[in-house]
Amino acid sequence: MRESRIERTKMLVEFDRKMNQKYGSFCGIDEAGRGPLAGPVVVASCIMPLEDDKVLYGIDDSKKLTENQREELFEKIKEVAIDYHIEEVDENTIDQINILEATKLGMKNCINNLKSKPKMVLVDAVKNLETDILQVAIIKGDATSYSIAAASILAKVYRDRLMKELDKNYPEYNFAKHKGYGTKEHIELLKKFGPSKIHRKTFIKNFVEIK
């Protein structure tokens, strides 16, 4: 592991320790899949231990890690986390209530399904969640907080695995490669084959006719 990754983790953990001193126990929350044209948005909540001997060095913003690094950390996070929960909000719900509200719904469900109730919720950027628990929104939280970074890894790996499974049902769209994001290839396949059941109608209306 590069020294820079160790130093990055130390910085994220230090931020969380300061938050813990100020607010008490808290969970980090993040999502994966707000932007894609297909599939669910996935949200994860995570309460991580902050003792030196339990820190997972290598944790960082999921976007800064390779797929293999995320996969390895995904299993380790589940092993050491005090508590965690992963929630899917499907494409139909996204179309009905919009992606921001769908993300908030997933975050609310992630909080409610934790067995260890935190005193505070630390969220990546999103505000005004429907919960009585104190919430603090952090811009670029997955690059600032150890717990949010851990949640970002859980959400990202879970969703990537899900899209690979959905690829088996809809092989013509190549979901395993682009994970539903609006790549040039995906848009071309969407125009060729039309929308599948898991495409977000409100996201693809500029590319294909919605019946």
Image (spheres, helix red, strand yellow):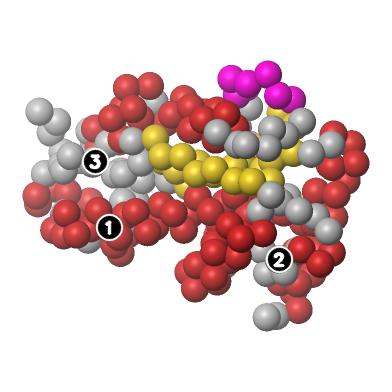
Along the viewing direction, whichever of 71 and 101 lies nearer the viewer: 71
Asked if 158 appears above or below 203 in the picture, the reply is: below
Q: From which residue to which does the magenta span run?
A: 128-134
Can you identify the residue that label 2 sits on? Answer: 56
In the image, residue 149 above or below residue 66: above
Q: CA distance from mark 3 to mark 2?
A: 36 Å
Q: Amino acid at mark 3?
A: His
| Marking on residue 199 | 3
Q: Which residue is mark 1?
A: 165
Q: Residues within 10 Å of mark 1 (few under 14, many from 20)?
A: some
Work out which quarter of the rendered image holds the N terminus and state it: bottom right
First reached walking from the N terminus: tag 1 or tag 2: 2
Assign a secondary structure to mark 3. loop
Mark 3 and mark 2 lie on one chain; the one further toward the N terminus is 2
The answer to whether residue 62 of the structure is visible from this angle is no
Asked whether disc 3 touches disc 1, contact meaning CB atoms under 8 Å apart, the reply is: no
Q: Secondary structure at mark 2?
A: loop
Say which quarter of the image contains residue 162. Answer: bottom left
Q: Quadrant of residue 88?
A: top left
State the SS at label 1: helix
In the image, residue 18 sits, relative to residue 118, either above or below, namely: below
Tag 1: amino acid:
Glu
Q: CA distance from mark 1 to mark 2?
A: 28 Å
**Mark 3 residue crowding within 10 angstroms, few (<14) / some (14–19) / many (20+):** many
Farthest front residue in view: 115
Q: Position of residue 34 (x, y in %)?
A: 44, 41
